[in-house]
Image (cartoon, helix red, strand yellow):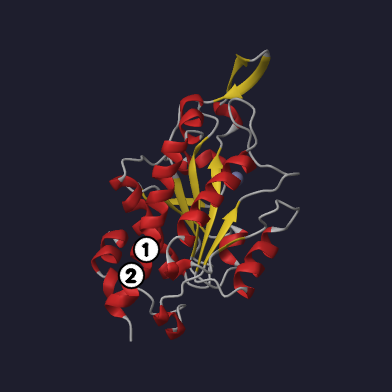
Amino acid sequence: MVVYLIMSCLSLLIFGAGISSDCWAGDFIIAIDPGHTINSPGATSARGVDEYLFNQNTGALLHQQLLKDKRFKRSFIINETGDDISLSARAAIANQQGAHLLVSIHHDSVQPKDLSQWLYQGRFLPYCDKFTGYSIFYSEKNGSPLNSLIFAVILGSEMLKARFCPTLHHAEKFTGGDKDLIDKTRGIYKYNNLVVLKKTNMPAVLFECGIIKNREAELQLGNPQYQHKLVAGLFNAIKIFFSQTTVSGP
Ligand SMILES: [Zn+2]
């Protein structure tokens, strides 16, 4: 119901706060935040590849796509070199650079209880084929929570349009976390204490592209055509989000 209302009122609500009139020149800065670092690479895929490498690749593809559009030419990648950096520092960089939207890019894992073992290239590695799909997180503690949610709704809608499916496994209660599934259809979760989201002033979401512990999904997520389709969905959502200013601006 909440999401329905948001979609219904989208053109009226968007950018009530958080985007200044300077943007009317069409200069929107997107901060792309590839999750994790070289030394602390996040999850490990079913075939033993670090999550950071997936995040770095998707972040770079999105950046290239944004640079082709002059409205987004000042977009940048946070911590492009993959150095050790805190989550707060990531948010601080986005704030200092005056970003209008932050998109944190991740690739997902599962709970240890859902893992099985398989033999891959002589090594026993954990995997989980039980879950697959993307997920989107936003925080109500973010500096622009309503616009974060609006962007999440647009992104989820674009993902569905491109025939991607969300995973609902983060909603399992045993995790004890504060992830709250608020839109099952679009795979949107409220995750208020996610640091990189709650410390940013501009609208922000964290996008889990897919589950790399899933053997089939890992292959898809490593496939250039699939990556192109995923990045096209992200780019379309960004364009739609910022086009709303043209509809409802001052
Ligand atoms: Zn991650």
Measured along the vertical axis of the image, is residue 3 above or below residue 106?
Answer: below
Do we see residue 182 in this rendering? no
Image quadrant, ligand 1: top right
Pick whichever, 187 or 46, lies toward us. 46
Res. 249 image quadrant: bottom left
Quarter of the figure with the N terminus: bottom left
Residue pointed to by mark 2 = 243
Q: Is disc 1 placed on a helix, strand or loop?
A: helix
Tell me if the residue at label 2 has its CB under 8 Å from ligand 1: no
Residue 149 image-quadrant placement:
bottom left
Residue at x-position 66% and y-position 42%: 42
Cβ–Cβ under 8 Å for marks 1 and 2: yes
Image height of 25 relative to 189, above or below: below
| x then y, percent, for residue 12 | 28, 76
The residues bearing labels 1 and 2 have C-alpha atoms spaced at a distance of 6 Å
Residue displayed at 53% across by 65% down: 75
